[in-house]
Image: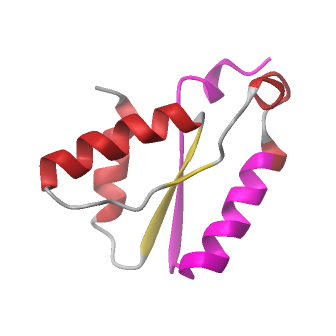
Amino acid sequence: MCMPMGGIIALKGIEGAMVILHGSQGCITYMRRHIAEHFDEPVDVGSSSLNEKGTIYGGSAQLKTAIDNIRKAYDPAVIGVLTTSLAETTG
């Protein structure tokens, strides 16, 4: 399992909270699948969909876009941003 998975579960316990993972689409798909399977219901979690260029340069533009998209789609009271191992290897 991956460390951000615990962060997702903790943040989902906050009413009105939405989570964004700053990492690749594959990371979030993996976590969504396992959490949905465990709780037997779908889970909404956003992703910055970090790509190769974003990994090298930090992906701040992709993260800002993800935050804007989450605000428009869900209007959350709180947005939690969690990093993945991909985002932590920037540079």
Across and down, in percent, residue 24 comes to 60, 33
Across and down, in percent, residue 63 comes to 72, 50
Examine the rendered structure and indicate whether residue 52 appears above or below residue 10. Answer: above
Of the pair 26 and 71, the residue shown nearer to us:
26
Coloring scheme used: secondary structure
| Left or right of residue 70, residue 14 in this image | left
Q: Residue at x 64, y 29 (%)?
A: 87
Across and down, in percent, residue 3 comes to 36, 31
Of the pair 23 and 89, the residue shown nearer to us:
23
Which of the image's four quarters has the C terminus?
top right
Examine the rendered structure and indicate whether residue 15 appears above or below residue 18. Answer: below
Which stretch appears magenta?
A: 62-91
| Residue 66, magenta (yes or no) | yes
Q: Residue at x 66, y 18 (%)?
A: 89
Across and down, in percent, residue 73 comes to 59, 77
Q: Residue at x 77, y 23 (%)?
A: 52
Examine the rendered structure and indicate whether residue 62 appears above or below residue 43. Answer: above
Examine the rendered structure and indicate whether residue 73 appears above or below residue 45. Answer: below
| Left or right of residue 76, residue 61 in this image | right
